[in-house]
Amino acid sequence: MANKKASVTLVDVARVAGVSVMTASRALSGDGYASEDTRAKVQAAAKELGYAPNALARMMKGGKTNVIGIVVNDLSSQVVNAFVTALSIEVRKVEMDMFIYCSMGTLGEARGAAVSQMLHGLWDGLIYVLPCMTEEFLRTLEGSSSPVLLLNYFRHETTLPVVRGDNLNGARDAVAHLIELGHRRIAFVRGTAHTGQSDLREQGYLAALAAAGIAPEPELIYQGNFQELSGLEAGRQLLSLASPPTAIFAASDTMALGCMNAIRERGLQVPDDISVIGFDDIPAASLAQPPLTTLRHPFQPMAQAAVQELLRRIRNEPGRRQRIEFPSELVMRVSTGPAPQQSAAPARKRSAARKTGAA
């Protein structure tokens, strides 16, 4: 039965409905006139036969595919997955389908052009999620006539529409929170520069220090790569300093979780001996022990704005915007606390004493 339905054509639908093939096409596509009675008969025949219009055939005739394409660089990223999940909900709300393509790395001019050519015509509009792309490929996208939107892109200035979260002010709020708790030696763990987010989060870190009259110390800034292992390595190095930090701000939750593992390795406790704060509020942040204080981007509202803005361009509707920016929210959990009043060495002794039950 399934094979029979798969072979149903528009000719079969027209025959059952008692109309011409051209009339059946107009009734199903909405292009051109067809009376309500005729439209109802054709749709009923299509449903009875299990007929599904072929998206590629519609594209070849210049029609819409009713598909929004999503391009990502890394499906292992929890942030990317959170955005894709949110986008799938919003695309479903507008009764469209979603096509996901993973480019597996940075999109350069040659690679990006190949991807664009491959995907051309399969979608009505395209959303690049947290994209890693060269400036050359970005300029190629800007010259395209196809509707394209960038979600959470910061690396270069662009004429393309961008929906993104506020990284700089969020990071400043995170570090200001640590300063209010009495911390003065605050470390920062950078992420990679591919998307520009880490640079903005570092600017927020430095701005908060400057506002409090705290001079930044190069030894307290560690180059990570947004992955948990780099956070573990950062934590180990920072805790090995002659004067370790009393707090660590990591440019991502994954790196913050790695730092917490390094702290536990030393027999120290979070936040009694050292506070940790991350960025992104991935699902693992609330499940960590202790739960991680972090900055949250509103994934669902951002996805909704991205889909709606792309639809305005697909439909050539008024009210289009080039930049939509959402504020970050400081999510207070248990991984941050008052700065310890003693040096790191007594702190280690206190942690050991707690473990052995010594006074």
Image (cartoon, rainbow, N blue to C red):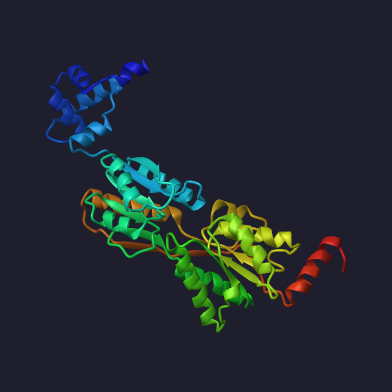
- Would you place residue 67 above or below residue 323 in this image? above
Picture mark count = 0
* Residue that lies at the very extreme toward the right in this rendered image: 358
* Quarter of the image that includes the C terminus: bottom right
> What residue is at 20 percent from the left and 35 percent from the top?
60
- How far from the left and from the top, in percent, is residue 179? 59, 76
- Given residues 135 and 231, the one toward you in this image is 135
Left or right: 90 with respect to 218? Answer: left
**Quadrant of residue 136 within the rendered picture:** bottom left
* Quarter of the image that includes the N terminus: top left
* Residue that lies at the very extreme toward the bottom in this rendered image: 213
- How far from the left and from the top, in percent, is residue 83? 44, 50
- Given residues 331 and 113, the one toward you in this image is 113
- Given residues 244 and 272, the one toward you in this image is 244
User: Does residue 123 appear in the picture of this structure?
Assistant: no
**Quadrant of residue 166 within the rendered picture:** bottom left
User: Does residue 57 appear in the picture of this structure?
Assistant: yes
- How far from the left and from the top, in percent, is residue 183? 63, 76
- How far from the left and from the top, in percent, is residue 48? 29, 20
> What residue is at 68 percent from the left and 68 percent from the top?
239
> What residue is at 27 percent from the left and 55 percent from the top?
140
- Would you place residue 89 above or below residue 174 in this image? above
- Would you place residue 76 above or below residue 356 in this image? above
- Would you place residue 220 above or below residue 69 in this image? below
Left or right: 344 with respect to 12? Answer: right
> What residue is at 60 percent from the left and 74 percent from the top?
219
